[in-house]
Amino acid sequence: MSTTPSPGPTAVPTPRSAGEPDAATLARTAEQTAGALLAPAAPHRLADVVPAPRQVQPDPTADWTLPAEAVITSSADPAALAVAEQLAQLLRPATGYPLPVTDATTPEPAGGIALVLDGSADLGAEGYRLDIATDGVNLTAATAAGLHYGVQTLRQLLPAAIESSTPVTERWVLPGGTITDAPRFPYRGAMLDVARHFFAVEDVLRVVDHLARYKLNHLHLHLTDDQGWRITVDSWPKLTSIGGTTEVGGGPGGHYTKADYARIVSYATARHVTVVPEIDLPGHTNSALVAYPELAPDKIAPPPYTGTEVGFSYVDPADERTYDFVADVLGEVAALTPGPWLHIGGDEAFKVKGEVYTGFVERVQRIVADLGKTVVGWHQLAPAAHLDGRVLQWWGTNGEDSTTVEAVRRGARLIVSPGNHAYLDMKYAPDTPIGHDWAGLIDVRKAYDWDPGTHVPGVPTEAVLGVEAPLWTESVTSLADIELLLLPRLPAIAELGWSPRASHDWADFRDRLAGQGPRWTAAGITFHRAPEIPWPTGPALPAPRDASLETTFDR
Ligand code: TNX
């Protein structure tokens, strides 16, 4: 924490010299004047990061201010350069600085930010080391992913105004010291249900941004459900032309073309987020049955469904045509999927029981394996035979689950999404305007205070691949709704996935989380002002740059 006292309200003198100063001189004068007046220089500590870093060594003598002429250098590797360019894009709007990006073959200019890929650095596949010193910033990682995570940390260490989309006058100080960081779990995700309500590509990209900000690395898209089918399948075109035209509440629905979907995947990939597509089978399939009645057990098209009940629909497990359908759909989805996972749902197929259900799942699991992908499914898959690598997504609300424990004993790994802690569609409080409460209310503390590593009794931490926060969208109709339910709980789940268990501390988390509020405000992001979080009061942003010439600073 800087000890520089705040100067308080002070009038900035209007610069006047012989002749009219040009715009550049005016801007520079304003910046210097403001730089001298704005304080405190480093309003937060090196440890004020969400999720909490593994190791933080502050050096209060080593604060560094980003100069207007700073250059970002990067190892010549294209993926590292891409991270460097993203860093520049994050910093340019608010600073107004040019921040050119160059590869490391050019001599490193003094006082810049250097991104260094160093395979010999003992930082793991996703770790990084961030050194902030008086002569500049060095970010080191073994992979571009590690650099990306270091950039997210660096971003949070700058003043909140860095989130502004237009230039503001601010001293862009980073607190000095070293952060050495790496995640606890390899799988850290969130799910967006685009089936109950459809969301435009732009909305999904914005969700990817929120994930990336908190070092989450998987976006699970729930692409199909009773109320709508959202992804083009060329070999079964009516899935979208008919099945895609409905949603909860009777709205128009919609679907992603393959080009749309590829755009989501490439945007996510560039932010080190792996997309996990889910085709929910054999239940949750009414929209497919409307389009193709031949898949229905009675071969009669059901009416389109726009309500919110679950568990009534299923594709016919006794008809070979169903397996052609599954193979075609999963084949086309796999072809759009660079990541290793294919999620096959499996939840709430109440009308497909016992051996018929497990037989169906076992066939679908083999189809996935033959496509070279790894099966993920809701934990209802547990009784089906094990298949190498298989991952179960556990969404229970009661820790006891002997069927899942047995599946883990046979080799399954677990993604933990407890309905009563990680479900982002649960209300925060009785007066939350949207959301459910079937798994209880989830305030921020409830979202934070549990341990994915030990949550399911009998499942060892080594079998836990990670954690995921699902957002079901029966009651969610807009981007603002999505953000209201995501923030501030998504960072809580992100911290459970990333930070070492030893750092788990509600009071400390609450204070660090509070510091995110002004960032969201500055970025125009909706969030729930949870009453248990000490959100800072006062303006989120300093004055816009132009106004700094004649305005009064009141900070
Ligand atoms: C249960 S969780 C479901 C979803 C609903 C959700 C509402 C799970 C695997 N299935 O179909 O949307 O509850 O919270």
Image: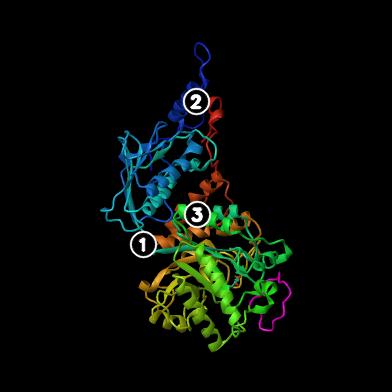
Q: Position of residue 299 (x, y in %)?
A: 69, 81
Q: Which of the two discs, 2 and 3, sits closer to the camera?
A: 3
Residue 393 visible somewhere in the drawing:
no
Direction from residue 505 to residue 517 in the image, left or right: right
Report the residue marked by disc 1: 500
Query: Which quadrant of the frame does ligand 1 lie within?
Result: bottom right
Q: Which residue is mark 2?
A: 27
Residue positioned most to the left? 120
- The residue where tag 3 is placed is 266
What is the three-letter code of the residue carrying label 3? Ser
Q: Secondary structure at mark 3?
A: helix
Q: Which one is in front, 8 or 496? A: 496
Q: At numbered mark 2, what does the secondary structure look like: helix, strand or loop?
A: helix
Question: Which stretch appears magenta?
Answer: 296-310
Q: Who comes first in sequence, dot 3 or dot 1?
A: 3
**What type is the residue that disc 2 sits on?**
Ala
Q: Is residue 429 left or right of residue 176?
A: right
Task: Give the answer, above or below, for where 251 lies relative to 106.
Answer: below
How is the model colour-coded? rainbow
Disc 3 to disc 1, C-alpha distance: 30 Å
Query: Would you say residue 275 sits in the magenta stretch?
Result: no
Q: Residue at x 40, y 56 (%)?
A: 52
- Report if the CB atoms under discs 2 and 1 are less than 8 Å apart: no
Instruction: Say which label, 2 or 3, has the lower sequence index.
Output: 2
Q: Residue 128 appears at what percent x and percent y?
A: 34, 52
